[in-house]
Image: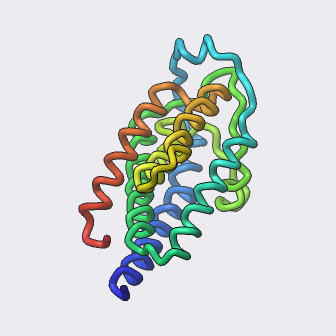
Amino acid sequence: MLGSFVSMIWSGVCLGTVAAWFTKWILPWNENRKELVVLQDPLLQIIPVRDCSTLVSFLSAMHLLWVLITVLQLDFEKVCLHNMALSYLYLFKSTALCLCPLRAPDGGIPIVDTVLRCMMGGQHFIHDMMFSGHLGHSTIISMLINSSSYIWYLKPILLTYCLLRSRSHYTIDLIVSVAAAHLSLHCAKNSYVC
């Protein structure tokens, strides 16, 4: 029990360090890049635009609630896997942002996630396209939950709908985020921390 508690604390330190690096340096650098590219996404052209910020904020609050419940259940191994997978997701997203300089789709309504905004000190970024961190995180949590309740599997689908509907991400961003989430969880399961 003590070993898994220490692993959970260490994974939290890793996540905090990577998240701070990502939000303080990578996101502002990417937001101010001059050479951002706009993709022509045919799926976005047929879906009507709608602001889904409230629903996305609610889904983010559900993520935090899941982490809190998992900690209170003393399932330190699952929290450790979550923290390490999210750390890897941030690292993969940092690499993707450097390699794929995408600008937000034209005509979209930027998602204002109040939960995430509070965690990031009020900062708001709209050009962090490649890939969706919201969908990646939601996919990681859905894969970590061993439950007969299918509501957790509907979350990534609902989130995909919201992100496409608000034109906050391109279709390719959402596809890559699911693949990155799977890769992140695989790396976390094979790390020395968990």
Q: Give residue 172's quadrant in the image.
A: top left
Tally of numbered tags: 0
Relative image position of residue 7 (x, y in whole percent): 37, 78
Q: Which of 96 and 185 is in front in this view?
A: 185
Q: Which of 190 and 153 is in front in this view?
A: 153
In the displayed orientation, state which residue is furthest to the bottom.
Answer: 2
In the displayed orientation, state which residue is furthest to the front.
Answer: 148
Image quadrant holding the N terminus, namely: bottom left
Residue 60 against residue 75 in the figure, above or below? above
Relative image position of residue 33 (x, y in whole percent): 55, 38
Residue at x 24%, y 61% (from the top left corner): 190
Relative image position of residue 183 (x, y in whole percent): 31, 47
Q: Nearer the viewer, residue 76 or 127?
A: 76
Residue at x 44%, y 79% (from the top left corner): 9
Q: Give residue 117's quadrant in the image.
A: bottom right
Residue at x 44%, y 73% (from the top left corner): 75
Residue 113 against residue 42 in the figure, above or below? below
Relative image position of residue 87 (x, y in whole percent): 42, 60
Residue 80 against residue 39 in the figure, above or below? below
Residue at x 56%, y 42% (from the top left corner): 155
Instruction: Specify whether 109 is left or right of 40.
Output: right
